[in-house]
Amino acid sequence: MIIANASRQENRAASGRIPPLPSAVRGKEPMARDHFPFRSDPALTGPPVLRATAIALSFGATRALRQVDISLMRGEVHALVGGNGAGKTTLVRILLGALRPASGTLEIEGDPVAFRSVRDAIAKGIFPIYQHLSQFPDLTVRENLAAFNLGMAGGFLARNAMPSDKTMRGWMDEVGLAVPLATPCRDLSTGERQLLEIARAIAQEAKVLVLDEPTAALTHADSETLLQTIDRLRARGTAILFISHKLDEVAAIADRVTVIRDGACTIAGAPMAGLSTGDIVMAMVGRDVAPITDIAPHRSEIAAQIRGLTVRRRAAPVDIDVARGEIVGLGGIVGSGADRIAESIAGATEPPAGTVWVDGRRIKAGCRRDAVAKGVGFVPTDRLADGIFSILDVLQNTSAANPGLLARWKLRPAEADAQARRMLERIGLVPFRLDLEARDFSGGNQQKLVVARNLLIDGLKLLVLCEPTRGVDVAARRAIHEAVLEAAGAGVAVIVASSDIDELLGLCHRVLIVRDHTVTGAFARGAKRERVIDALAGETA
């Protein structure tokens, strides 16, 4: 299957239908592009469904957007791409009515509009599908699909507003969601919940879908299903704004591309057929960003020992030794348990059984305070729920793991400020403002704050990271990887749990395969990518 997909990619790249992937993304598992009838000259006619012209907005001295133009045509996928902090989120919030621009205009099918809220945008047929989905987890699929109708009707009219099961199944069929209507939403996979969100938008006759990093937390199979759904929606005439850092997906699905850099358009609605992903990377960051290929050897002495760890009852116990300066990957698809193992090692959750020693000192199970005191850093999978303190500023966020960092006898505030500044410069915080609250930053820059906080832990000995570069741009990915390598070079043991195969193969000294909440195999650095993929799928490593 992998070889067949790669062969299709090479053939189509040679024919000019799909531009070849640059070094920054080359080697990623390609999408099954035969599902996507790529249109190098899409028949996009009539006025744009949504047009934004000369949009500008500043936050104090920070110019978030500078005369940005974007238009979405009926029946097209328009990719919006840019580095973390480039202005994408601000533009999207304006398109959705969450912010009002300082200048510029919005039009829906040629008519000027001035949104005062997200409700106004939805009423005009513009629907957001966020990374963090907005369903009611304790309600059924049926109840979630009917939520808009019931909410708009209210009172005694709600019963009459309830759509029929046949109607709701029709919405689900359009997105390829095949689950019973009585299924509780919390029992759905992440991919199924994503499709349910889109089905809700279809139910409201959406003209425009705004998809914000829709595949960031999906498995490869779920990503393909979602992209096939996007292609079907394009065919039915829906305009789709597709926001993603995954440039192979952009190349596979987009008709046109807009790139924002430092609040201004560097590529404005250009046909994807005329661009390579190398062009997009250059427009995003102004330079080529190559993946890391060489890492320093680790030391021989053991820094961390994990013994008899089980994160699910009846799962086989996990034993791992990590040497000083060694980077060990835990590779697994979403739901494999790789993140659960990492969380237990870092003291973020208490496992049913098992012990963790760092430098010969036992970590109290399920106690982050004890783990931090003994030099264990932890970057969680969900930065919003478990990582950042949204109403605290940058310095408070980066020092949060060191309760004594600002103590007068430990380190003066000015020195703490300088230490944080050096680290945040190292990983490229944008905008570089230590006084801003964490909620004022893009998701990728919030991730940088969480990584910086843990790299600044006093006496750091073991760093555990879950999906450390999910949702970040190619330049930020490189910066985070370099910071992790620098820590390893200083003797810190590192564990990286990730569903990104290329991240693990590029960054780690060895990769452990996790399936069914236990380790089922191991690969040394330099292993063939296809063999690792096969092991993740269940073949013997």
Image (cartoon, rainbow, N blue to C red):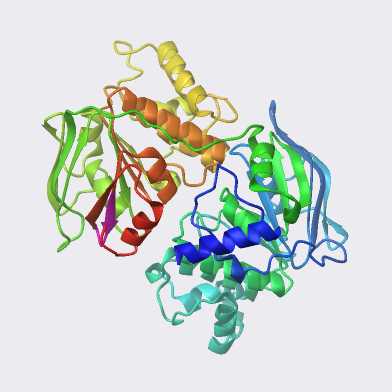
Left or right: where 360 falls relative to 537:
left
Left or right: where 423 falls relative to 152:
left
Q: Main secondary structure of the magenta part?
A: strand
Residue 391 placement (x, y as % from top left):
49, 36
Q: Quadrant of the C terminus?
A: bottom left
Total tally of numbered discs in the picture: 0
Residue 74, image quadrant: bottom right
Q: Is residue 131 in view?
A: yes
Left or right: where 477 falls relative to 234:
left
Q: Is residue 210 in view?
A: no
Which residue is at a point 54% across and 62% down the rendered structure image? 7
Q: Which residues are magenta?
A: 512-517
Q: Is residue 42 above or below residue 95?
A: below
Q: Nearer the viewer, residue 420 or 328?
A: 328
Inspect the magenta stretch and tell me whether residue 515 lies in it: yes
Residue 394 placement (x, y as % from top left):
49, 28
Q: Nearer the viewer, residue 360 or 274?
A: 274
Residue 435, image quadrant: top right
Which residue is at a point 55% across and 35% down the rendered structure image? 475
Residue 292 placement (x, y as % from top left):
46, 35
Q: Quadrant of the N terminus?
A: bottom left
Which residue is at a point 42% across and 81% down the rendered structure image? 182
Inspect the magenta stretch and tell me whether residue 307 lies in it: no
Residue 269 placement (x, y as % from top left):
77, 51
Q: Nearer the viewer, residue 492 or 380?
A: 492
